[in-house]
Amino acid sequence: MSRTWNIALLQLDIASGDPDANFAKVESALNEAVRSDQDKPDIIVLPEMWNASYALERIGELADVEGRRTREMISAFCREHAVNVVAGSVAVKRGNRVTNTSFAFDRGGAMVAEYSKIHLFRLMEEDKHLTAGQHAGRMTLDGIPAGLAICYDLRFPEPARKLAVDGAIMLFLPAQWPNPRLNHWRTLIAARAIENQMFVIACNRVGSEGKSSFFGHSMIVDPWGDIVLEGGEEEGVLRASIDLEAVDRARRKIRVFEDRRPDLY
């Protein structure tokens, strides 16, 4: 298996409360991402809550029941195009509960991970309408150990560190990160990458919703904190290649994981 991965981030505007429009947009963007054989990605990443966005007052009626619609569409796409997909996150309804849930699929269309956001963002009233997840977002794609987090999870160093200690060399982060906190976005992504000597692959939305506007700037940051890719504020398919061996080189150079003192903290 090649140690170079081609990545496509789908930086999209999202229609609040309109799942049909959003599913159509995502399907079109996925097809655009694989249209060129020359730049065909190994993995495609979507933003957070792309099925309904933050129409939280109606989220119970808008959420994808059991995630079936999302899983069926993304799984079929992966099988057809032999590509991995981290399907951002969507509102998923199970019984009376709605979660902000990310699914990941391998090249054969098998679901390899399901992760529900564990830190709910009170400034957007997620805590009033959603149920927090209870498990870490571990997965393996193409034999590569990786992890999942969602938006506000980025502000907490512990999940990324736990995933890295357990072997993850990449962290995927779908988000709806708004203005005016672009500096926080850049700084925290770089911090998680540097402190865990891993790639952080973050896909943010653009556009506006209510009083919030979203700046995009989807990013890939390498284990040294260097920016591999940073988007602007427009919709589009953002592409980059990463050298997975960079993780081993960084961890051999500065042996953070050997020098940890978990007995003291």
Image (tube, rainbow, N blue to C red):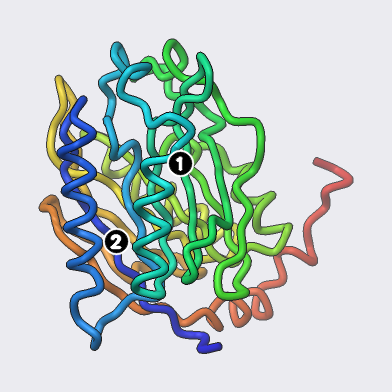
Q: Pick whichever, 84 or 163, lies toward us.
A: 84
Q: CA distance from mark 2 to mark 1?
A: 15 Å
Q: Residues within 10 Å of mark 1 (few under 14, many from 20)?
A: many
* Residue 214 image position (x, y, % from top left): 19, 38
| Residue 216 to residue 126: above or below | below
Q: Sort mark 2 into few (<14), some (14-19) or many (20+) by Cα contacts within 10 Å.
A: many
User: Which residue is at a point 25% across and 82% down the rendered structure image?
Assistant: 39
Report whether 88 appears left or right of 261. Answer: left
Task: Point out the image quarter for the C terminus.
Answer: top right
**Residue name at image x 56 percent, y 31 percent:** 118
Residue annotated with mark 1: 150
Q: Which residue is mark 2?
A: 9
Q: Position of residue 171 (x, y in %)?
A: 51, 57
Counting every numbered tag in the picture gives 2
Residue at 23% in and 33% down: 19
The location of residue 151, given as percent across then percent down, is: 41, 39
> Which residue corresponds to the image point at 19% horizontal and 38% vertical from the top-left?
14
Corner quadrant of residue 238: bottom left
Circle 2: residue type: Leu
Q: Is residue 249 above or below residue 226?
A: below
Q: Nearer the viewer, residue 188 or 167?
A: 167
Side (left or right) of 136 relative to 241: right
Which of the marked residues, 2 or 1, is nearer the chain's N terminus? 2
Which amino acid does the dot numbered 1 rest on?
Ile
Task: Quadrant for residue 176, please give it.
Answer: top left
What secondary structure is marked by label 1? loop
Image quarter in which the N terminus is found: bottom right
Q: Nearer the viewer, residue 140 or 187?
A: 140
